[in-house]
Image (tube, rainbow, N blue to C red):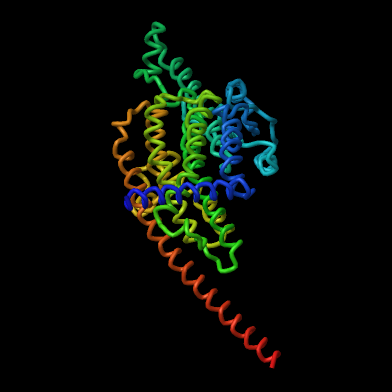
Amino acid sequence: MSIFHNIGQAISDACYIWRQEMRQVLRDEGVLIFFIIVPLVYPLLYSWIYNNEVVRDVPVVVVDDSHSSLSRQFIRRCDASPDVKVFCYAADLDEAKSLVSRQLAKGIYYIPADFDKHLNRMEQATLSVYCDMSLMLTYKAIYQTAMAVTQTMGAELQTKLSRPNSRREAEIAVRPLAVDDVPIFSPAGGYGTSVLPAVLILILQQTLVLGIGLSAGTARENNRYHELIPIDRHYQGVFRIIGGKAMCYFMIYAVMAAYLTTAVPRFFSFVQLAPWQDLLLLMLPYTLACIFFGMIVSCIVRYRENVMLLMVFVSVPLLFLSGVSWPQSNIPNFWQSISWLFPSTFGVRAYVRMNTMGATLNDVILEYRLLWLQAFLYFVVACLVYRHQIVISRRNALERLDRIGRKLEVVEKIRRRKKK
């Protein structure tokens, strides 16, 4: 009977800790923002910004020193493309660079004076493209448009030079090997479909760690002895504390994970190939790993402001280390080892392959098992860290009681002296 009584008491204490943690979450505005507001609003804002997938009508400045029919043909075709729009003509490169520096244009097409002369002599002509590299999407639009137009004009000149007897011979002379460019897993070939799924999973981890860190920082600030674990009979067991807190965070982020992985992609018509059953199985270890990881970070970083600085600082590196924004094969081994410490690395890779590329759970079984391993290891480490916090809390409580006892003895002695 004592065993069942202890189990029942442990469950009761865990539920008590869960209620207390839920109340603290609802009372703390900072925690409420990171747990509720940011996961709900930030993905919508981010997805809405990149919902167009690609940029259109990027303004460019043209410096035409050739003033020939071929140079005007090149300009007209670039202006007719969906990606580039001729903003204006400049007299020289200095004027064009001035317009780019003032952000009135994003690039420059420079056509030299000997452009038409070289082409008429059947020689290779040079055309210069200057791009603003501060935004890769505009650079891609300007450069690829110039490449496509020059290739088309070169093919037409090559057809005239070869003088084919039929249209089929002209097609073969210009394009002997036909290549069809089909972007797989990203029909629009845009930024949103390729990167936003990874961002959604990263938001899940970052907001969860930030919220847990802020909650722990508030608990320390409210206690003048900077204790994380209150001195209460309900907080005397490590598993009860971890279980109660984790239950609170899991209940909130089970809803947030379902919203981020199923609702947001559907709102903006992103590619969504994974069934909800597989996503549920994937999000279970990922959410648990993030919870226990956040609890460890909340114990290591003592002040709530430091948690915000740390997690915001590592957000962009974690996106690159996940292998989505930057090829995984090009990441050095040292940084790959560092990335294994974060649940987002394996969570992003598994989610993108399942939801965007159509992989099954068996195809990402390695990442799935590693997430469960992370959840277990971080649970063990969280238990050890919280056990250390309990020891410190008890020691501080005993020291505080000892000081109070000494003060009471001094007060009692003073009172007796006054009576005498």
Give the residue at x 60% y 62%: 221
Res 73 → quadrant: top right
Taking the view exactly as shown, the residue that stands out farthest to the top is 166
100 in relation to 310, above or below: above
Q: Quadrant of residue 400?
A: bottom right
Q: Residue furthest front?
A: 420
The spot of residue 318 in percent (x, y) is 45, 47
Q: Nearer the viewer, residue 336 or 282?
A: 282
Above or below for 316 versus 56: below
Residue 62 visible to the viewer:
no
How many tags in the picture?
0
The one nearer the camera, 398 or 25, is: 398
Q: Position of residue 66 (x, y in %)?
A: 62, 30
- Above or below for 61 versus 75: below
State the image coordinates of residue 258 (x, y, percent, origin top left): 48, 32
Residue shown at 52%/28% (left/top)?
Answer: 263
- Residue at position x 50%, y 29% from top? 190
Percent position of residue 12, x then y: 45, 48
Task: Work out whether 125 lies above or below 252.
Answer: above
Instruction: Name which residue lies at 61% across and 20% down.
Output: 80
Residue nearest the viewer, comparing 179 with 56:
56
Q: Between residues 308 and 14, which one lies in front from this camera angle?
A: 14
Quadrant holding the C terminus: bottom right
Residue 318 in view of the camera: yes
Tell me if 182 is positioned left or right of 138 in this view: left
